[in-house]
């Protein structure tokens, strides 16, 4: 998604069940379908015969403190296999004949074993042509000339000018990132972008050793120059996501994995969410705000927004489904937060007042008095947004009206600040003829 497009849609769907542990596969399937469709759907993205790569976040399969296996479902740290299964089924509805691969580069060795530990097998997810550990599919150890690799020249790279990608991954017709809703000890937050910018790197090229998939030597994670964020920008730019589905069934603070501060049970957040969107920058911006972190303090989001890979300006992001401030929770991170990171400035909804509104046969005109913190205004008739063009930076709205039937209707006005705190007012009106 290019930031020159006017708006980005991000969907947030929250289960009505009180606890993530009670959410069933039927619930997950419904949530994923609703979120994907609210965000624009796969219909215009995936064609019959396409090769589709799905990249879930399967960073580890064990608790680093206890050594015990993670729960296979809703652990908050890895993408729940059932979320991925629901996405696979949606892909196959549109593309029954093309190749469909699930690919990952875990921090544990081997990725193939991590997949098995987390139910990423044909027994649990059918209709997949292969479950591929990226380090096993990219040639031998330090084999930079492997035919399974693709060297990408990046003249505008912030850290390096060339990077190595798995060829099958890079050349996929469609790339779907299935990420997790987590705060991160080094990157502030992790979502659809970091899932690719770190987890898609071939460990046979970038790992610590032949039997150590960790990427800590690949790029400094905590240096003052912010090399980690520059790397994420660059590597993501080599092959951006075509769609992001974010597993927020549990959500996890103090990530990226258990053991950084507390045990995994203490850091699960019970979010009961699925998020989705075509613009990964917009999705991760919205996810940061859901976790109570200021996205402007996440350097790789700023870099990618500046480079034209997506929108992080809330005035250009429309959230469908649940609102950000409705589902927000305060996610922690290490006792010493990542350099430059900060929480959002306020949780107070901006105030406004409707000074006037006029309706005629084909136009709505609205004038508001609003606080200076307002960054976006949306107008709805009978809970349907009138037009993408109605979202604006000013407080004077004008748009074409749909043909309304005789009788009672409602105008809903929503105003948002830079953190997606919002307030709204609903005004009933009557059409006489």
Image (cartoon, helix red, strand yellow):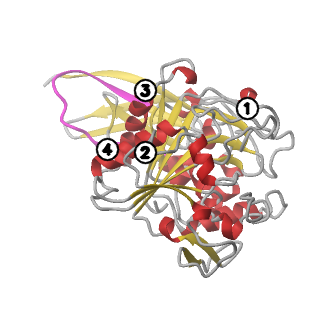
Please indicate whether residue 13 sits to the left or right of residue 372 in the image: left
Q: Is residue 402 above or below residue 219?
A: above
Which quadrant of the view contains residue 357? top left
Could you say whether the residue bearing mark 1 is in a helix, strand or loop?
A: helix
Could you say whether the residue bearing mark 2 is in a helix, strand or loop?
A: loop
Q: Earlier in the sequence, mark 4 or mark 3?
A: 3
Measure the C-alpha gap from mark 4 to mark 3: 37 Å
Could you say whether the residue bearing mark 3 is in a helix, strand or loop?
A: helix
* Residue span colored magenta: 394-413
Relative depth, front residue between 109 and 264: 109
Residue 369 x/y as whole percent? 51, 34
Q: Residues within 10 Å of mark 4 (few under 14, many from 20)?
A: some
Measure the C-alpha gap from mark 3 to mark 2: 32 Å
Kindly identify which residue carries mark 1. 264
Kindly identify which residue carries mark 2. 391
Main secondary structure along the magenta-highlighted residues:
strand
Judged by depth in the image, the label closer to the viewer, 4 or 1, is: 1
422 within the magenta span: no
Measure the C-alpha gap from mark 1 to mark 2: 40 Å
Measure the C-alpha gap from mark 2 to mark 4: 10 Å
Which quadrant of the view contains residue 117? top right
Relative depth, front residue between 383 and 210: 210
Q: Earlier in the sequence, mark 2 or mark 4?
A: 2
Kindly identify which residue carries mark 4. 399
Q: Is label 4 in contact with label 3 (beta carbons under 8 Å)?
A: no
Could you say whether the residue bearing mark 4 is in a helix, strand or loop?
A: strand
Kindly identify which residue carries mark 3. 27
Measure the C-alpha gap from mark 1 to mark 3: 24 Å
410 within the magenta span: yes
Measure the C-alpha gap from mark 4 to mark 1: 49 Å
């Amino acid at each position: 998604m290019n930031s020159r497009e006017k708006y980005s849609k991000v969907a947030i769907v929250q289960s009505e069940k009180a606890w993530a542990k009670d959410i069933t596969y039927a619930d997950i399937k419904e949530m994923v379908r609703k979120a994907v469709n609210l965000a624009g759907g796969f219909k215009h993205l995936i064609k019959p015969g396409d090769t589709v790569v799905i990249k879930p976040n399967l960073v580890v399969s064990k608790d680093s403190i206890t050594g015990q296996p993670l729960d296979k479902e809703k652990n908050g740290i890895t993408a729940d296999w059932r979320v991925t299964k629901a996405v696979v089924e949606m892909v196959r509805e549109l593309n029954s004949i093309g190749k469909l691969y699930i690919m990952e580069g875990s921090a544990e060795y081997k990725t193939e074993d991590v997949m098995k530990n987390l139910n990423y097998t044909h027994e649990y997810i059918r209709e997949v042509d292969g479950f591929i550990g990226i380090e096993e599919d990219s040639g031998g150890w330090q084999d930079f000339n492997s035919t399974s690799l693709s060297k990408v020249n990046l003249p505008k790279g912030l850290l390096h000018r060339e990077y190595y990608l798995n060829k099958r991954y890079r050349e996929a017709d469609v790339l779907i990132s299935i990420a997790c809703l987590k705060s991160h000890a080094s990157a502030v937050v992790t979502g659809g972008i970091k899932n690719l910018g770190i987890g898609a790197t071939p460990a046979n090229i970038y790992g610590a050793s032949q039997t150590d998939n960790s990427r800590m030597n690949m790029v400094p994670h905590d240096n003052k120059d912010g090399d980690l964020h520059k790397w994420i920008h660059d590597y993501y730019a080599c092959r951006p996501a075509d769609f992001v589905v974010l597993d927020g069934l549990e959500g996890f603070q103090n990530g990226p994995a258990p053991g950084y501060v507390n045990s995994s049970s203490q850091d699960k957040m019970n979010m009961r969410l699925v998020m989705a969107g075509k613009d990964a920058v917009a999705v991760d911006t919205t996810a940061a705000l859901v976790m109570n972190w200021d996205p402007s303090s996440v350097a790789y989001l700023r870099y990618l927004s500046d480079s034209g890979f997506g929108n992080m300006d809330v005035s250009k992001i429309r959230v469908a489904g649940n609102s950000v401030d409705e589902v927000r929770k305060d996610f922690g991170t290490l006792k010493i937060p990542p350099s430059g990171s900060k929480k959002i400035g306020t949780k107070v909804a901006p105030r406004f007042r409707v000074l006037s509104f006029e309706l005629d046969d084909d136009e709505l005109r609205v004038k508001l008095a609003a606080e200076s913190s307002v960054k976006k205004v949306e107008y709805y008739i009978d809970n349907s947004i009138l037009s993408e063009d109605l979202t604006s930076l000013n407080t004077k709205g004008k748009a074409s009206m749909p043909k309304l039937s005789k009788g009672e209707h409602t105008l809903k006005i929503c105003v948002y600040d830079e953190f997606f705190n919002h307030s709204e007012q609903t005004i009933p009106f009557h059409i006489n003829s």
